[in-house]
Image (cartoon, rainbow, N blue to C red):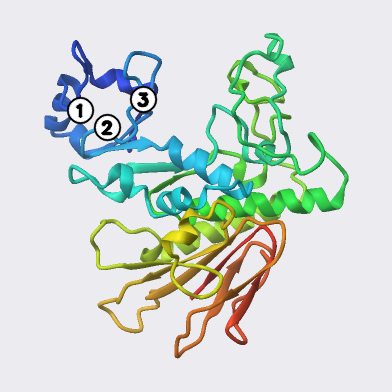
Amino acid sequence: MHVDGFRFDLGTILGREPEGFDQRGGFFDAVGQDPVLAKVKLIGEPWDIGPGGYQVGGFPPGWAEWNDKYRDTVRDYWKDQDGTTQDFAARVLGSGDVYDLRGRRPWAGVNFITAHDGFTLNDLVSYNDKHNDANQEDNQDGHSDNRSFNYGVEGPTEDEGINLARERQKRNLLATLFLSHGTPMLLAGDEFGRSQMGNNNGYCQDSDLSWVHWDGLPASAEALREFTKKLIALRHAQPILRRENWRDGMVVSWLNPGGGEQTDEQWADAGSTTIGLRLERRQTERDSGLWEDVLILFNPHDGDVSFLLPQIDSGWTVVLETADPDGHARAVDGSNYVLTSRSLVVLK
């Protein structure tokens, strides 16, 4: 039937034994020894409402898990929330603090910004609050901690400035997702900005609210879809953006706008959120078209930031910029790069 694997809802129950959660429990052992099941993709939602129900990082090797730490941190970071930078750095690099143990690999963490529960990507940047009135539960259902922001107006608006900010934030969130190490998960419809009109608990809606409409999309939706395709193609083409092993020889550096590596004091500075990630890894095949040196700059501030680029003989080339999604690759003139407000830039 061409099934690649299984995702288990409320998956903590799979490992709950009489004494509590056990990653060596009977179900996990049986699956791990099965000649067919041991080779398919197994993904757990690592929480339920029972005792000891939160088990992110607790599943056995061979399993992947939804990583809600990634979801929450990335949402907070792009809202420019103070004190998020150090945790954001860990999430972008695959959450090694969670998954680099017991022989698990970077792909064990399933990174996501949105899922079938909660806001869609469009609604995440369009609503401050949930709007679940159609569910007939007096708006009491659904999660209230959405870490969302509407940029000045609740819901749809004709304000061009607000709409531009929202579109850029969608691109920032999608770019972060596909440039992060780990397994990316994209909610169907987010690639073109599907909305549930602020409803964050649409499971009970068999209506226009929850249907995915593929046709008759506005120009902004088509542009977002093209940008998403570009991100997926970039990740697929460049292995340096999707490491498969924690100890693969990659050199990782986090840089500050002044051009140096982040210091302990800068990591501790709650308001210092503009950072750069440099990844370096020599390729065994020369002239293969594979990148050996890439720089990703993140600026969640609502103002421009000048970033001093590291000196390299060949110079840097911009290959992707969320502030200019239609732009083509171009060489950087000089050593200072001005990061547009609320933007992400990839250079090689």
Secondary structure under the numbered disc 3 in the rendered image: loop
Q: Give amino acid for label 2.
A: Gly
* Residue 2 visible in the snapshot: no
Q: Is residue 347 above or below residue 78?
A: below
Q: Residues within 10 Å of mark 2 (few under 14, many from 20)?
A: some
Give the structural element (helix, strand or loop) at label 2: loop
Q: Position of residue 24 (x, y in %)?
A: 15, 27
Q: Looking at the rendered structure, which numbered label has been put on residue 251?
A: none
Of discs 1 and 3, which sits in the foreground? 3
Asked whether disc 1 touches disc 3, contact meaning CB atoms under 8 Å apart, the reply is: no
Location of residue 282 by image quarter: bottom left
Mark 1 crowd level (few <14, some 14–19, many ≥20, 10 Å Cα): some
The residue that label 2 is drawn on is: 58
Is 259 displayed left or right of 103 in the figure?
A: right
Quadrant that contains the N terminus? top left
Q: Element under label 1?
A: loop
Identify the residue at image location x=53%, y=78%: 309
The residue positioned 45% from the left and 52% from the top of the image is 86
**Residue 170, image x and y in percent?**
64, 49
Mark 1 or mark 3: whose residue is earlier in sequence:
1
Q: Which mark is residue 23?
A: 1
Is residue 195 left or right of 282 when viewed as pictured? right
Alpha carbon separation for disc pair 1 and 3: 13 Å
From the viewer's side, name the closer residue of 303 and 117.
303
Which residue appears at 27% of the width and 20% of the height? 14
Q: Estimate the x, y position of residue 42 in percent, counting from the top left.
A: 29, 34
Mark 1 vs 2: CB contact within 8 A? yes
| Residue, disc 3 | 54
- In terms of depth relative to the viewer, which is nearer, 110 or 152? 152
